[in-house]
Amino acid sequence: MNVSRRKFLGMAAKVMVGGIIVYGVTPSVLEAIARDKTPQASSPNDGKQKHQWVFVVDVSKCIGCMKCLEACKRENLVPPDPDSRRTWVEEYTAGEDGAALGHTANWGSDGPERTGPSAEHQEPAGTKGFFVPKLCNQCEDPPCVPVCPVSATFQTEDGIVLVDAKRCIGCKYCIMACPYGARYLHNGTRTVDKCTWCYHRITKGLPPACVEVCPVEARLFGDLNDPESPVRKLLKEKMTQVLRPETGTKPRVRYLGLQEGVR
Amino acid sequence: MKHKLFVASQKLLKGARRFAFIGLPALLLALVLVPLWQLGVRAPRLPQLSPAKLVYQVATEQRIAGAPLQYTGPANCAECHSAQYATWQRGKHATVSCEACHGAARPHISDGASLSANPSREACGACHDQLDTRPPGFRQVSLAQHYSHSTCTACHPAHDPTRAASRPTPTPQGATTPVPTSEPTPQTSSTPLPQPTPSASATPSAPPRLGPPIPHPLAGDCLSCHAPEGVLPLSGQHSGRTDGECLTCHLQGGE
């Protein structure tokens, strides 16, 4: 085998250039392909503009009618048992000092506990407790995503955390990682399921099913990129809170009128 | 005789020496520059996700986004149920979506599946039953105590709960009871009297005897519940009376 120096150097150069091309360019090309498609999935109308979806829960308005649970189960084919839930409503009953004590363990799926007004209570209704609707916070830094061993759960460009039921192996690491208890194991598919803010509705410009049926506007939904969005105005005017800010997950469900002690 | 390969290797070695002077610095430069270029220009986007993953995620996103809808929104009911829609829109339940009470309507609209229209007291109680945990501003009644003998819809039509059910059609005897009249009921114009207290004009003039006080705070539309076909029909002597007159003889009061 007789390889001239010139040839050798030429080959080496080719290999080097080739390597650089493969190493440096391919990912960007693939990424570009992927990016090209992504906007179609998230916003059919406009190519570039990303959504800035936001969910607002007004605790002071919730009447605990549980229509939201009913609608969520129906809309997203969630099994009927109380442990399977994408959203739920906690009923807090105030203690002696007025602080929030505890909440129902049934995730509200049996309806609120029937604690009617008793004769000795002179206070108007509502002073004895309140309801707190809960759902996935679609955290900006979701702790549930990196723990997935098969990358079945991920964040879309618009910040919605989804689970690919075809990839999920049901190991439940993500259930453990979520500080809000927003994930559950679907007892039919044996894969993990969670609230998507009704991804199939919001990508079509419709409100999530729970928002659609809420009779008292305790649940509100909007896109901060939409200048007309009432939620945008609301967030400008009012102070909101998030659940467990100390976890640093940057939750994106904003709460109005959240009492001390609700976690 | 030297082996051909040996000759070649010698040449190569020679070449390598030259390479050390020109090629090596060039290579080193490239080795430094390429990663720098990677870092500076492309790095912010690289560490996100491996490209293969992104491609499959797009497919998953599209699959999830394409799931069928169950809840359609009230606007889709107006076309076929214009009467109910109009009544609902002007009433106190206008903030309550049709499907909150009737359930998801997609199968109803696209496949003609039937929807439930549950008039039970419990169905209304889901929202209105008095609970300690409900916000005080929200109108509630004790399901056990509030007119417990009857379904709610007998007095509160579901789509417009504070308005009369069907207006009582003119009752046989009392001539024509006109459409809900307002207080004065002036007939044939004439002298503008200073706010006439409801006249006994249309009815046989008898000394007005006070009736029992009204035990509930609801004003207006009295006949929607007290007409012959209402929940608490009036006795015969009231025939021909109109809403505007009631308060002359019945005072608000009592619990």
Image (spheres, helix red, strand yellow):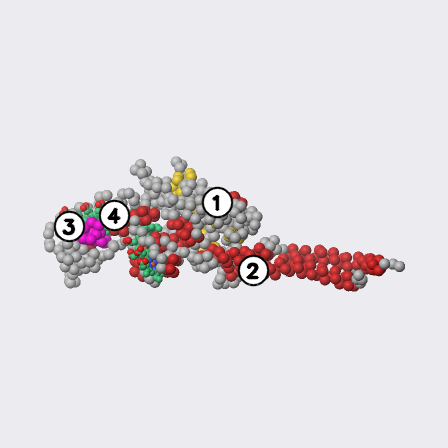
- Do marks 2 and 3 both belong to one polypeptide chain? no
Q: Amino acid at mark 4?
A: Ser
Instruction: Tell me the distance, in whole angstroms, between the alpha carbons under discs 2 and 3.
Output: 77 Å
Are the residues flagged by discs 4 and 3 from a single subunit? Answer: yes
Give the spatial CA distance, label 2 vs label 1: 32 Å
Q: Which residue is mark 1?
A: A181
Residue range in magenta is B220-234
Local secondary structure at mark 3: loop
Element marked by disc 2: helix
Q: Amino acid at mark 2?
A: Arg
Q: Which residue is mark 2?
A: A35
Q: Are marks 4 and 3 in contact (CB under 8 Å)?
A: no
Identity, as a three-letter code, of the amino acid under mark 1: Gly
Q: Residue at x 47, y 47 (%)?
A: A187
Front tag of 3 and 1: 1
Comparing A28 with A76, the one in front is A76
Say which residue appears at 71% left-offset and 56% top-offset.
Answer: B31
Assess whether residue B246 is covered by the magenta stretch: no
Q: Secondary structure at mark 4?
A: loop
* Crowd tier of the residue under label 3, counting other residues whose Cα lies within 10 Å: few below 14, some 14–19, many 20 or above: few
Chain letter for mark 2: A
3D distance between C-alphas at marks 2 and 4: 61 Å
- For residue B219, above or below residue B176: above
Q: Predominant secondary structure in magenta?
A: loop
Residue A170 falls left or right of residue B101: right
Question: Which residue position holds label 3?
Answer: B235
